[in-house]
Image (cartoon, helix red, strand yellow):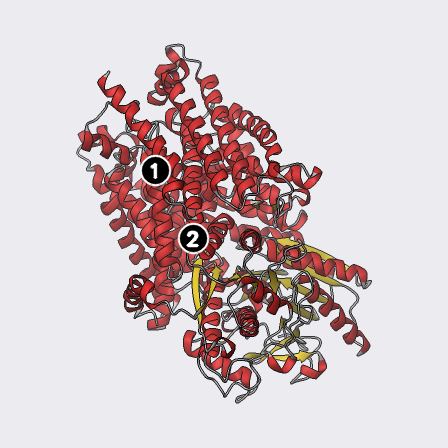
Amino acid sequence: MRNASRAAFGWLALAAGAIVYPLVLPGAFYIDVGTTLLLAAATAAAWNIIGGYAGQVSVGHAMFFGAGAYLPLLVYKLWQWPPIAGLPFGIVVSLVLAVLVGMPTFRLQGHYFSMATIAVAELIRLVVATAEPLGAAIGLQGPAVGRGVWDLTFRSGLPYYYLFLALLAMVLATSWWLQRSRLGFYLRSLRASERAARSLGVPVRRCKLLALMLSAAFTSAAGSLYAVKTGFVDPESGLGILVSVQMIIVAALGGAGTLFGPVLGALILIPLQTLTNTYFGGEGSGLTYILYGGAILLIARFEPGGLLDLVYRARGLFAKPAPSSEQSRHAA
Amino acid sequence: MRGNRLARLLLLAGALMAAPLAQAADAVKIGILWPLTGNAAAAGQAAKAAAEVAQDIVNNAHPELKGIPLADTAGLPNMGGAKLELVFVDHQGNPSLAQQLALRLITQDKVHVLFGAYQSSCSFTSTAVAERYGIPFVIGDSAASNLTGRGFKWLFRVTPIATDFAEAYMRFFDDMKKQGKSIRSIAIVNENTDYGTSVGDAIEAAAKKNNMPVAIRIPYSASSSDVSAQVLQLRDKQPDVVIFISYTSDSILYMRTMRNLDYVPPMVLGDDSGFSDPSFIPAVGDIAQGVMNRSSWDIGKPGSTTYKINEMYKAKTGRDLDDTSARNLQGMLALADALNRAGSTEPEKIQKALRETDLKPEQIMMGYRGVKYDETGQNVLASTYLIQLKGKQYEPVWPEKAATTPIQWPMQTAKH
Amino acid sequence: MILLQVIVGGLLLGAIYALFSSGLTLIWGMMNFINFAHGEFVMLGMYAAFVMVLWFHAGPLAFIPVAALALVAVGLLVYFGVIRSVMRGPMLAQILSTFGLALLLRYLAFWIFSANFVSLPPTALRGTLRIGGILIDVPQLVGGTTAAALTIAMHLFLTRTRAGSQLLAVAEDRAAAMLMGIRPDRMQALAWAIAAGSAGIAGALIAITYPFSPSIGEVFGLTAFVVVTFGGFGSVPGALIAGLLIGLIQALSAFYLGPIYKDIAVYALFIAVLWVRPQGLMGKA
């Protein structure tokens, strides 16, 4: 009980910090960095539902992010709708994709699911890059100057910041609910041992599919907000493999399969990216990536279970909501 | 140069700490967005060096550079000799990072003008930020034609764009036909990102308008490690001119594969980029003799202004100035000219001065007919030369008044 | 005749794919370890050759073995420095560590050699053979045959030698292998040394024909993943056949459909294969 209330206190403090951050550091640049951080946390938390809790490592989440990012700009291009109106369409497309990818591949285990998701995402990227109606290689643009408030083209970054914060809150709330639900229990059990879960009557494929759809829907929503904010998407920035990899890195760095892991990952990685790029980017020596890659390597080397493990060990504050390090590498 | 990286790094760290103190009140700050890492890093790095040469030309007295505005004085005379201060950032080819960095440059570094951004994707997002904040943005080099023409008021582009190149090619073909060369059809081979697609589309459209049959259009991915299928397709279609819109490794690969498959069309026309990369000639110069290339830049004879500018660049990088970087250098010089005439760092005054820009051919280093922007911000006097690889360097061969040597057509007379 | 030329070109390209993928299949199949930095190993092999040529004007007979040895050293360093501890963690840590390693290696090369493209100056391995109307690029031919030879050698090593079967035993069942007195640590280090060394040879051979820059590893890495999955994890002959097949599909689809469709064709086929035969062409079910 005491632990639970301390956890609740921790979350409250974090939420309060996130809400007042733009007021404490009001520069447009800091707000944009904050927004980037929230986006990274939200996509990683969405990925975490299938990749962390269910242990199905998708390396193709860019397809959902891209669907989410393309649809708003597509409805703008075709019918001059406000881009945000494309968000539900993006989710629908992503759900369809999730079913199409999930149905066949969830027969497979381990690396096969990863490889299949890479392949599907790359296939979609390549097809979109040749599709004239989708802007082909050049990409799609949103309204450069807003025609009304619904175009959501603000000069101030503040509205975007709170939009992304709301999204992150929704993903985390869903994850929190998931952890305590029957589905969450099933997912953890099938992650530990799929065979055992199946023999205990867990509907393995259906659970995985549900988790993937949930994950896809949130990733897609994040993609839509990204497109509305950026006002631009092209195959590389919407569907590139780095988009998928970033979600994995953020989640794994913090601790996959935990509620707080993706947030922690983003809290570390995004400032690291921004700092290295701010101080060494203009130099152009590549030092940005040497430090960034080196930091990731070191964390993986010394904390393979994610930094949250370290936090728990150091603080001994509360019991882990879900153990993260027993994700079996013998799964495949 | 590489050896003293550490020294430069320490210097940089020192500069960062000393920044608030050292900030000269009257310096004009230019924020420059380029891909200094990632796949386009080579182009970004070369452009960075070119921008630093432009800064040197403006900030220090260079009376030896005849005709170039602001060369013979130190700093901007109308602003009491204010210096240009360049703030480089690396957007890594990521459009959302470009957006964030444009914000940083405007709100944190308080730059007066923005300059960039190479990839069209990054230009799209960063110019939109400049537009929202009312800060002038000068595009040094980005291909997509629809960058200008979005109704932006703060956007200026010095470089010629895809449609200009396409028209130049058509005029060139007409001239050749008048000289009795046979050009029954052309082929367009383009890499399939924003650059290749924009230019390829423009050429195809111009060819249609000029009744020039396009025998085949081949879009391909620049990361291909084998292009023999494409070369065989070309050999099959027998076009009289093959236009390559290619990056570095693919243009080299095409030349080698054509040689290996024993295919020599009457003329190969490279669209700048890969064919202008300093690694192109060392790699395939011997087998690509007679290849033509588009360029607005010519190093010129020893003693000429352009030659001296090239020497400055070479001292910095060890390589000759290529066309892409030269266009960026020219963009910086044209911007500096406007800044000087603005006489102030107020955005509106800079915008007005940019609009009133009217540089004559003798005031610029490139082969443009001048610099003058239309209402969309596009330089309407931008134009290009065509050059041909003879020996170890390209020589201007078209238009006739810029030619230093007669054109060789077909590119290779005897097969070896 | 033109079709034959396309097929020959595709097979030669496929052999190159097989060449740089064979090392990955060893690591991935034997140790169930995803190495995102494999493409960077190939890239390092290219620069090792470049340095040898630049400093010592070495020919292929000198720079290929040197590249192999250099990469064996890198492989061992990576194994003992990083992989050994990462292997105890979850599968995600593998992705995390090797992705970090890939960035680190790529940008170290960037720092040292700059972003500019370089090519090797002409070596003894240059020119074109004309066989019955078909033109064959000599470096590609050498690369292709070396790939085949290397793959066969690797296969023989694994199946016919004592060290090889010990390696396989560790892959099969680590605990049982330990009971039999095999030291898994040494075997796994050996696997990394072989994998990195073969990537080094691949890089040096490819560098003869292709211009390269530090970011070239990205392309090789992704292709290698597809080849390995296609062929079946851990199957060395599978990687060879899959490499050849993918090269062939690319060449044919590039010629008949257009080059932008060649990767689309590969991925579409790849997904189809995963669907009907998830274990890959030669993988164990």
Side of B400 where C146 appears, left or right: left
Same subunit, tags 1 and 2: no
Image quadrant holding the C terminus of chain B, namely bottom right
Residue A27 in percent (x, y) is at 42, 48
- In this picture, is A98 found above or below C206? above
Disc 2 target residue: C217
Side of C109 where B267 appears, left or right: right
Tell me the element at label 1.
helix
Residue A272 in percent (x, y) is at 34, 47
Q: Amino acid at mark 2?
A: Gly
Disc 1 target residue: A265
Task: Please state which of residues B155 and B405 is positioned toward the viewer in this rendering.
Answer: B155
Mark 1–mark 2 distance (CA, rounded to whole Å): 26 Å
Residue A261 in percent (x, y) is at 33, 32
Side of C47 where B157 appears, left or right: right
Q: Is residue A49 visible?
A: yes
Q: Residues within 10 Å of mark 2 (few under 14, many from 20)?
A: many
Task: Please state which of residues A301 and C262 is positioned toward the viewer in this rendering.
Answer: A301
- Quadrant of residue A283 in the image? bottom left
Task: Please state which of residues B19 and B31 is positioned toward the viewer in this rendering.
Answer: B19
